[in-house]
Amino acid sequence: MSKAAHSKLRSIECKRLVIKIGSSILTQSLDSSEGTCVQVERINALCAQIAALKASISEIVIVSSGAVASGFSLLGFAQRPKDIIDKQACAAVGQARLLWQYEQAFSKHSLHIAQILLTKDDLSNPKRYLYASAALRRLLELGAIPIINENDPVLVDELKYIETFGDNDNLAALVAGMIDADLLLILSDVDGLYSANPATNPNAKRISEVREISEQITSLAGQDTNSAVGTGGMASKLKAAKKAMQTGCNVAIIKGANADNIAKFFNGEDVGTYFHLPANAIKKRKFYIGYVAIPKGKLCIDSGAQAAIKGGKSLLPKGVLEVQGSFEAGDVVGIYNPQSQEIARGKARYNGYECAQIIGRDSKDIAKILGQSYGDCLIHCDDMAILE
């Protein structure tokens, strides 16, 4: 990556990072004589690099493939099975083995991990999306490293028809958008995007920087060819990069087989391919909240709450004076100041009835009033768009 690209990366002050690790990075070749496909030393090396990043990037999420690949040899299969039920069985066994390896590796650096298994429904249902997002943010606040994978053991469509949900490259892009990540770092089995297929063309050149994922750039990836242990190729990674960039997230693809590449990338060395955001890029998720979604209700707030949200804080129940309209958790609502001016919009964590019960009260009273709590705020700052 050029110094200009590195300067761009530093300028965004990466505080929230999503790292996608593919099956081919985590597993041994099929002719290995060992009883497991998991490459323990590589996981240890990757986790050491990620632990080192925690000193400067406090919030890191890992999207990890490898459950099926980790499980099929343990169950006696010579290669990745094609039968759906067999894949589900392999995923169930492999996920346990994979998470145990991550736990062992990160514990050496006094870091805790958290397992999050997602399905397509978790991302398409507004209420479940909201709660999944809230859980992820809380884990990050507590210093844990969430490790996310598709919930393969209970899926059918996602295992059989890749286009219905996508592989973990796509999942990583969706997670990046869910938590408003600053950077999506995709660890691949190749050095980045090339001008031609480096496996067949000795003159192929690595492309250090991409400023727009045009049709010409997309054509360089060719057609995806799934490996013996994974499902995503370069075309999949470009689709994921484009999706992440549409949420205002920077993207880079680097070779993950050498764990040192992570440090090299953040030190500004020329590794992988870096995808620039447009100069005027905005968080499209917040754009949707602020200017596209139709508000289902209103929250009228006091001057103290107005100052707080203008300063980037979440909206707490204590600063809300009135609730208007009927809405569900996850719906977008308008936020109005004491002069009845709409100053912001956001996704409500509680439905209209629940909001009415807790406004004007301290956050610590929410669970006592409602019998349960989904967080101490009515609208999290990450789910809020300030209207200019």
Image (tube, helix red, strand yellow):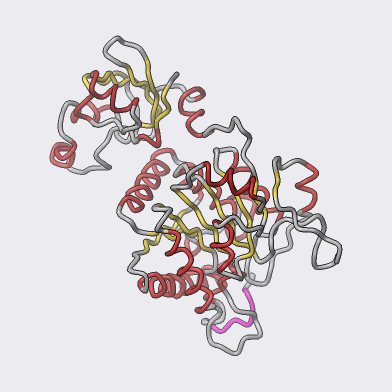
Q: Was residue 78 drawn as part of the magenta stretch in this picture?
A: yes
On screen, residue 95 above or below 156: below
Q: Which residues are magenta?
A: 75-80
Q: Nearer the viewer, residue 106 or 297?
A: 106
Q: Nearer the viewer, residue 387 or 96?
A: 387
- Image location (x, y in percent) of residue 192: 69, 58
Q: Quadrant of the C terminus?
A: top left
- Image location (x, y in percent) of residue 59: 40, 52
- Image location (x, y in percent) of residue 190: 69, 64
Residue 346 appearing in the image: yes
Q: Residue at x 50, y 47 (%)?
A: 176
Q: Nearer the viewer, residue 55 or 24?
A: 55
Residue 168 appearing in the image: no
Q: Nearer the viewer, residue 189 or 170?
A: 189
Q: Residue at x 56, y 68 (%)?
A: 260
Q: Is residue 140 left or right of residue 78?
A: left
On screen, residue 381 above or below 240: above
